[in-house]
Amino acid sequence: MEVYITQILIIIAINIILAVSLNLINGMTGQFSLGHAGFMAVGAYTSAVLAKTYGVNILLAILVGAAVAGVVGFIIGFPVLRLKGDYLAIVTLGFGEIIRVIILNMKITGGAKGLPGIPGGINLLISYTFAIATVIIIRNIMLSSEGRAFLSIREDEIAAEAMGVNITRYKVLAFIIGAFFAGIAGGVYAHFYQFLKPDSFNIFKTVDILLMVVLGGMGSITGSIIAAIILTIVPELLRGFSEYRMVVYSLTLIILMIARPDGILGKKEITDIISFKKRGA
């Protein structure tokens, strides 16, 4: 039982990293990317191959994998982010599938059979160190001048450009940062499960991450954390009702979105709520 709870807690940490990093792109910069599972796959496989084949320390391998995911984010993002809305969503979705198909056909990744024997060593301390670091770094970015540029693009891209904000630069920057942290999540995932298969990074994984962002609130780091916790625990609680699991899970999401169409916290953070209550008191 203790092992099971530890596993759930580590999955929550991985999902927090994914949700917060995608929120930077979708919620705070106003883009609509569906390529996060692809970046996660790049980080996961790079880290796994470095550790397994070349004996690289897993922490260094995770960081290198994240850096490679960030570089891929730049290469893909620079031409792609000139697109907007649905077009951007379709292209990034296609990118995620291309990454998965490439992995599927590479010998070093194990192809469809998967990649076993990945060095382990991920525990609660390491996973939550990465999760907390992700939250702190992205929170600090949002409080910086770059963060204000991201928000200005989300609120009104034309007005932001008129005020001198380099739209393409900041869109690509958000994409690189988001891809980097998705790569971190992928590395932690690889060394925790010690086995990777391409199907783990398909469209359904992207939808899972997107649900966390939408449910928590597009633009709220706290909301993304809460949603990541809820959407990790609820499916586990429903394992005993396998026949009705997806029905109950879908109904839960529908009810939550009807009750809170802007997400659990909307664009607010927990600090906004606390300071509001203090002023009210």
Image (spheres, rainbow, N blue to C red):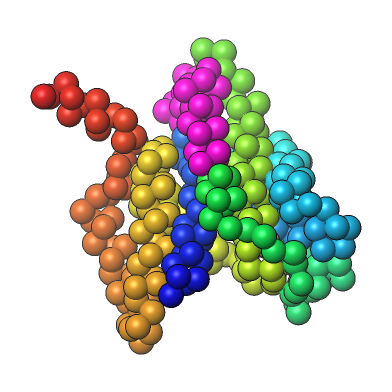
Q: For residue 51: magenta?
A: no
In the rendered view of the protein, which quadrant contains the C terminus?
top left
The reply to whether the magenta stretch includes residue 144 is yes
Q: Residue at x 53, y 27 (%)?
A: 141
Which residue reaches farthest bottom? 243
User: Which image quarter: residue 217?
Assistant: top left
Quarter-of-image position of residue 272:
top left
Name the residue furthest front: 2
Q: How many marks?
A: 0
Q: Is residue 281 above or below residue 18?
A: above
Q: Quadrant of the N terminus?
A: bottom left
Left or right? Give the position of 277 relative to 90.
Answer: left
Who is closer to the viewer here, 97 or 179? 179
Q: Which residue sits at x=34%, y=73%?
A: 237
Q: Quadrant of residue 52?
A: bottom right
Horizontal side of residue 191 vs 136, given as left or right? right
* Residue 66 pos. (x, y %): 70, 46
Start and end of the magenta stretch? 132-161
Q: Position of residue 78 (x, y in %)?
A: 71, 36
Q: Residue at x 50, y 34 (%)?
A: 136
Residue drawn at x 69%, y 71% is: 195
**Residue 118 visible somewhere in the drawing:** yes
Residue 30 visible within the image: no
Q: Residue furthest left?
A: 281
Q: What secondary structure predominates along the stretch shown in magenta?
A: helix
Q: Is residue 149 above or below residue 70?
A: above
Q: Position of residue 250 (x, y in %)?
A: 33, 69
- Residue 237 sits above or below residue 189 on the image: below
